[in-house]
Amino acid sequence: MLKGKVAVVTGGTRGIGYAIVKKFLENGACVALLGSRKETVDQALQKIKEEQKNPKVMGMWPEISDPKEVKEAFQKVKEEWGSLDILVNNAGISARDSLYDYEPEAFQKIMNLNVNAVFVCSQAGAKIMKEQGGGVILNTSSMVSLYGQPSGSGYPTSKFAVNGLTKSLARELGKDNIRVNAVAPGVTRTDMVAVLPEELIKPIINAIPLGRVGEPEDVANAFLFLASDMASYITGEILSVDGAAMT
């Protein structure tokens, strides 16, 4: 589905991001996997190379809220593979702090990675895509971008912002043949969810009509569809992948 395409995936070393990288590689794309540290990037690359035969993958660890570092990283991708067709802004952090205890620095840290970095990467990616005649930008949102959450207000605030940026960029960049969408996962079996005790996870599952939490591959499949030509007339959408979870 992505044969001949070149993709960049931020936050691609684990969880949903890693599943997206794998799914894109399996479908013929060349993928630049971005992470926060060389160590985690190297570990992810090694794991991919053990799981797949001759994957077209490279790894980098730029500061994704720094326009200069992002521009240089994206240019390296274009120089290596000739284009940048798909950008997945997946990197992000969450929080559960009560408003009464929320440190302003912690709130700003979430906004910097979850919002500012999405803007910086989207700007750098869009400039390359416009020059080559089009592309796709995909953002990782969250079910809490629709409902909020009872603590850690910085996280849902950042994801509401991601939704707004997604819809606005879709309207702005459509004339340049750049589609912009977001995927809003529900509770997904990442490392964080996997360690939750049964007494916590059971009520969560009971609130999901499909009767299970999502798997990273469920979310990666949505990204694959939106990245592919099958979604060529879809832009400005926030696609929920949550099993119709009920708040």
Image: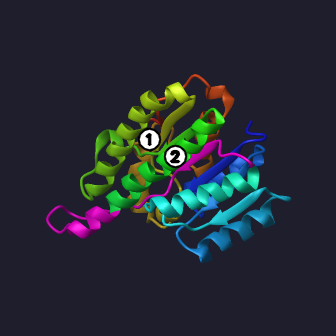
Q: Which residue is mark 1?
A: 208
Residue drawn at (78%, 40%), measured in percent from left and top?
Answer: 3
Instruction: Label 1, secondary structure: give it.
Output: loop
Question: How far across and how far down the image is residue 67, in percent?
Answer: 46, 58
What is the CA distance from the residue labelled 1 to the residue labelled 2? 7 Å
Residue drawn at (44%, 62%), measured in percent from left and top?
Answer: 66
Position of 238 compared to 87: left or right? left
> Does 136 appear above or below 205?
above
Q: Tell me if I can see residue 47 in this picture.
A: yes
Q: Is there CB contact under 8 Å for labels 1 and 2?
A: yes
Q: Identity of the amino acid at label 1?
A: Ile
> Does 92 appear above or below 185?
below
Question: Within the magenta stretch, is there residue 40?
Answer: no
Q: Identity of the amino acid at label 2?
A: Arg
Residue drawn at (61%, 77%), measured in percent from left and top?
Answer: 39
Residue drawn at (50%, 35%), measured in percent from left and top?
Answer: 180
Question: How far across and how far down the image is residue 45, in percent?
Answer: 71, 67
Q: Quadrant of the N terminus?
A: top right
Residue stretch rendered in magenta on the structure: 82-109
